[in-house]
Image (cartoon, grey):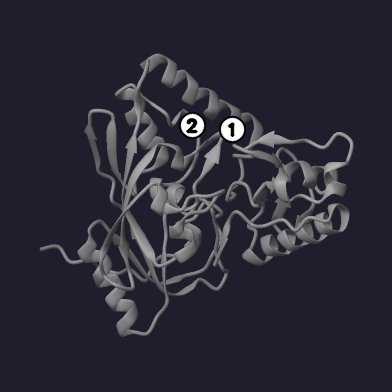
Amino acid sequence: MRKMKPRSDVELKDVTNYKIGGRILYFCEVDKVEDIVEALNLAETEHLPFFILGAGTNLLASDAGFPGVVIKPVLRSIELEGSKLKVGSGLLVDELLNFTIEHALSGLEWAGGLPGTVGGAVRGNAGAFNGETKDFITEVISFDTKTGQLVKRDNTACMFSYRNSIFKAKGDEVILFVEFNLAKGDRGAIAESVQEKIDFRKIRHPLEFPSAGSVFKNVDVRSAPPELLAIPGLLIKNDPFPVIPAAHLIGRAGLKGLREGGAMISEKHANFIVNFNNATSSDVRKLIEKVKTEIMSRFGVRLEEEILLI
């Protein structure tokens, strides 16, 4: 029987999109529940914190590294029964989309070009182009690290909201499997729609530099101050409900191109802080605070991070 082998030679910069972060004390790739239990036992035995890592696409890690156990699920199974699709949480979103194209399954086209794993998308209810991960989910199976039990939840029980879910709110469960109920469609049309989203991202996003994608959540119009909504030319879009893009506010504040060490607010998309020259976590964090301070001062809005900081 194969035994999971923790590694101590992995740095966070090597397993995150930002290419930032120091050494991980123990790095554990897991592809079954027994591996998760073993990694958790290691953390408990040595009195260490643990952290669940997806593809590291939405994460800013500490320069000091992580003094505990990083658990990375690599479950990548795909099971298709009719239009119901059950996939492992470690499957990359682009791998999932390739499968849906191959089998003419429609519903996830909005995710074209979305980085990261299925588990990460579920945890943060990732969304774009008026679609969200929750839209076609029927069931999520997770492992509760506190009770050691498997948990099955239907869509409602997952408590999805804007860029959030019960998994993100609780922070103590490992997503294992996700079931989608998709619709049969035209293979060519599905492929074309996915490619349109990929092409849009290539044009509009600074993919030439390491980043964690959009740093801040967009501002919900329903909670925005009246003074902000009264600004002439204010951009409002559906995401999937009316929001003011954080990028729009950052751009209007004249912050594009602002630098701190090796980090920079992208000229191409103001909600991206890119690592253009060996940036440190401290560089990025300083820019985040400068943006939040300036946007609060100018517009009376406190931006909230969409990325995770550890």
Residue drawn at the location 41% of the way across and 53% of the way down: 158
Q: x%, y% of residue 118?
A: 39, 45
In the image, residue 24 sits, relative to residue 19, either above or below, namely below
- Residue at the farthest left position: 1
Residue drawn at the location 53% of the way across and 40% of the way down: 127
Q: Secondary structure at mark 1?
A: helix
In the image, residue 178 sits, relative to residue 20, either above or below, namely above
Q: Secondary structure at mark 2?
A: loop
Left or right of 61? Residue 246 is: right
Point out the tag, 2 or 1, that comes first from the N-terminus.
2
Task: For marks 2 and 1, give the CA distance.
Answer: 9 Å
Residue type indicated by callout 2: Gly
Q: Which residue is mark 1?
A: 201
Left or right of 110? Residue 225 is: right
- Residues at badges 2 and 1 in contact (C-beta under 8 Å)? yes
Q: x%, y% of residue 151?
A: 29, 59
Snapshot quadrant of residue 142 = bottom left
Look at the image and tell me whether residue 251 can be seen.
yes
Q: Which residue is mark 2?
A: 112
**Label 2 neighbourhood size at 10 Å, few (<14), some (14-19), many (20+)?**
many
**Label 1 neighbourhood size at 10 Å, few (<14), some (14-19), many (20+)?**
some
Residue drawn at the location 34% of the way across and 84% of the way down: 46
Q: x%, y% of residue 277?
A: 66, 53
